[in-house]
Amino acid sequence: MVKKFVKPLLLSSLGLLGLTAVLWGAVQAIARQRQTQTEAIATEFLNQFPKTDLNDSAKELDRLNAALGLAPSVENSDAPEPSDAAQQAFRSIEEDLKAYLDEQIQKTSGSLDPVPVNLSQYLQDHRDELAAIQQHLITAETLTWELDPEAMADFSYAYPRFFPLATLNNLFLLQAIRDSQQGNTADMMLAIEASTQINPALFQRPDLLSNLVGLIVTHRQAGVLRHLDAIPATIPERLLALKQQQSMVESLNFEAWMSYGGLKKMVEDSSSWDLMAENFGDHIRVIPFPKLYLTFSNLDTAQAMEQTYRHLPGRSICDGGVSELETELMVQPARWNHLGQIAMPSFLAQWHKGGLRMLELELTQKVLQAKALAAQNGGQWPTELPELTSAVCPDEQWVYEVTPEGTMSLAFSHSFDDLDENRSFRHLPLMYQAKTAPAGADQPGPAQISQTAEAKDAAS
């Protein structure tokens, strides 16, 4: 009797195993096909960014920065370590420097406050060091650091230190303010030209970190420059040509593919499973067929991010607040992709920030344009300005007015009150007003330095 059922049962079990094997092979084939398709998209995108090495210009800047107490940009740099005295000297003014600049760039009218005594003394004590760095940035080739997408698709990759560049920018802007207040226009222009050489070095890179530091640099430049006199409007125009918002779209895509590549490496490396459990939870250990699940999860998350960022170039930050854009544009991972729902970040706020920085530059360009026309008109504000339509928000414009009392004002036609209050980034009030116009027709400044900088930007 028992034998009667053994053979059918055995055949049934073998059939089930065979069906399981077929299904398993089919799932594996689907995974391979989707990986092939996904990696073709990633390769096409990443091929835009060829591998580069640390160049001599960046190495020399590291060496010069040591005199100011700033750390080298890379761990294996040949630059000397900053001395304890140099580091202590900078630390003694670091917080005051940030506080002073943050207060100044919030101003929408009036002149900038005098540079505090301790900050002015620091500039005086390090005059030669700052002059050497400015000369280097203005005349040397654009700073270039290592860029290797394959190596960067590793969660342990050590990115260059970009924050010393933001520190340098703060010092250059501080010097420009002090020189402007002392009437040293030529020295002011040198500091500004050196400051604007930082931006291309950061925005030419596709990684998110360098672009975020670039937005910090741009934010302070725009807030300071519009309050200074005798600054050519071509300065913010050159910065606008870097297209900060489009650069943010590229950096978001780059970051998405780096995350995909990093998780793919971890899935393929069994030694990384403990690290994944630490980051995503112990439930990974009990998921049936975890390697296959993580493969599909990674593919689904990468596809969701790619589809989300694909629509950004055609959008304007004036289309809605960050939450509204997230609701409209964010492609969510599949319901089964619990890890993707945890791990997929929303970077739309960073894209939004790129647009705000461009609007700040537009405002600065219009203010400097009005100042230049007023200087040519004997200190009278022009009655109108050309091209007031915004390039960042084509359906909006800059509203320029001159009152009968002689006060000039510029304001943006769109209000950003709908920005979420819990967002951690600040933006300048997009308005400016001034009563007294600069008199005098000349726009002083070292023309040869400006031409050198513009030629270098064009070559880059």
Image (cartoon, rainbow, N blue to C red):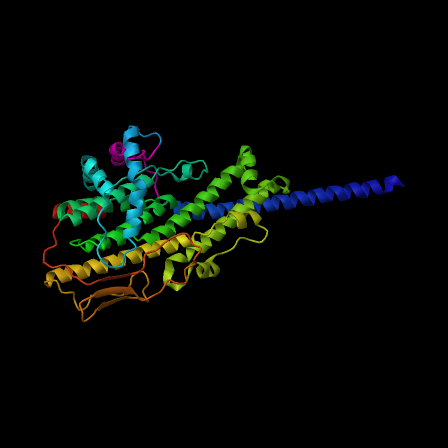
Foreground residue among 240 and 174: 174
Residue 303: x percent and y percent? Answer: 49, 51
Residue 339: x percent and y percent? Answer: 55, 47
| Residue lying at 44% horizontally and 43% vertically, measured from the top left | 258
Foreground residue among 446 and 16: 446
Left or right, 358 with respect to 232, comes to right
User: Is residue 89 something one can see in this rendering?
Assistant: yes
User: Is 33 located above or below residue 127 in the figure?
Assistant: below
Foreground residue among 58 and 312: 58
User: Is 396 located above or below residue 5 in the figure?
Assistant: below
Residue 108: x percent and y percent? Answer: 27, 59
**What range is drawn magenta here?**
48-74
Residue 105: x percent and y percent? Answer: 28, 53
What is the quadrant of residue 378 in the picture? Answer: bottom left
* Farthest-out residue, right: 1
User: Is 358 located above or below residue 96 in the figure?
Assistant: below
| Residue lying at 48% horizontally and 60% vertically, measured from the top left | 327
User: Is 130 located above or below residue 394 in the figure?
Assistant: above
User: Is residue 218 something one can see in this rendering?
Assistant: no
